[in-house]
Amino acid sequence: MVAIETSDLTRRFGDVTALSGLSLSVEEGALFGLLGPNGSGKTTAIELLTGQLEPTSGTARVVGRDPVTEPMAVREAIGILPEREDPPSFLTPREYLTFVGEVRETAEIETRIDGWADRLEFAGVLDALATGLSEGERQRVMLAAAFLHDPDLVFIDEPLVNLDPIMQERVKEQLAAYCSRGNTLFLSTHYVDVAAELCTHVGIVDDGELVAECDPRGMSEEELLAYFVEEVGGDPAVAEARA
Ligand SMILES: Nc1ncnc2c1ncn2[C@@H]1O[C@H](COP(=O)(O)OP(=O)(O)OP(=O)(O)O)[C@@H](O)[C@H]1O
């Protein structure tokens, strides 16, 4: 079954074409990574697929629904962690996650909050005001919010930003476990190591265009980096320096 399908999806902002003719298919159970340099269109793609932005042209289906005509149905079916999002400073993580759980009509909210706080190691700050949380703690709370109602498909823009190396490993384990249960993840990242280590499929975008797709399993990080640099027309010395 297909979780996400796009055809010629395009978004312009005035003279800037943020995303140009994206045609993509993501199977259910995939851990799909949209990999691209800064400004290549990754966030725009996520915003189009999650119904936050309307395309200039082209179409998308997400869990069988059209994000333009059925944005609420898409929103109900998915989880999302945008690139820049924090829990409100005047609420505790527990209060914020309870609110999200209630809006999402989540069963056993308390148990799920405790479960995610244990898995992502923020139980110690569950009842502290969010204003005092570190960047990494905020990111973990927001990750928990994206997964709290146990959606079949989750979008995450730059999943490991602000996390220390130990917590990065913990989050990678959780993301892989989520997909191993048959769920689908759509990540955007400009980190090749994240794509190489985690993803079952990678799409490379450059300047708003999908320039290549590959299965990174069986590729080393260096091989994926060399492939990425070649596809985005970067300086090969960057990849050679890492080999
Ligand atoms: N609301 C907007 N108005 C004008 N231009 C925009 C808008 N949103 C995005 N753009 C432009 O579209 C292009 C793609 O932006 P986008 O944020 O999708 O890239 P990205 O790959 O997510 O970048 P990064 O990795 O730096 O987060 C950029 O040139 C950006 O300046």
Image: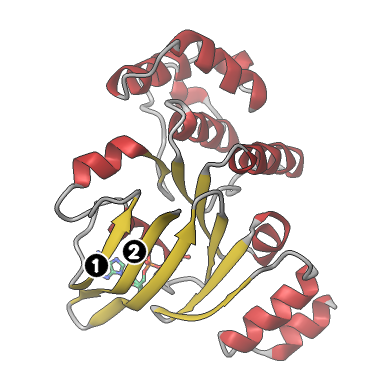
Asked whether mark 2 and ligand 1 are closer than 8 Å, the reply comes as: yes
Instruction: Tell me if the residue at label 1 has its CB under 8 Å from ligand 1.
Output: no
Location of mark 1 (residue): 59
The residue sitting at 53% across, 71% down in the picture is 203
Horizontal and vertical percent position of residue 183: 53, 42
Residue 135: x and y in percent read: 55, 37
- Left or right: residue 65 compared with residue 220: left
Q: Which mark is residue 44?
A: 2
Residue 3 falls left or right of residue 127: left
Hey, which quadrant is residue 199 in on the image?
bottom right
Residue 126 position (above or below residue 32): above
Q: Which quadrant is home to the C terminus? A: bottom right
Q: Secondary structure at mark 2?
A: helix
Q: Nearer the viewer, mark 2 or mark 1?
A: 1
Q: Furthest-front residue in view?
A: 1
* Residue 58 position within the rendered picture, expressed as x and y whole percent measured from the top left: 23, 73
Q: Nearer the viewer, residue 153 or 133?
A: 153
Relative vertical location of residue 225 with respect to residue 181 in this rendering, above or below = below
Amino acid type of disc 2?
A: Thr
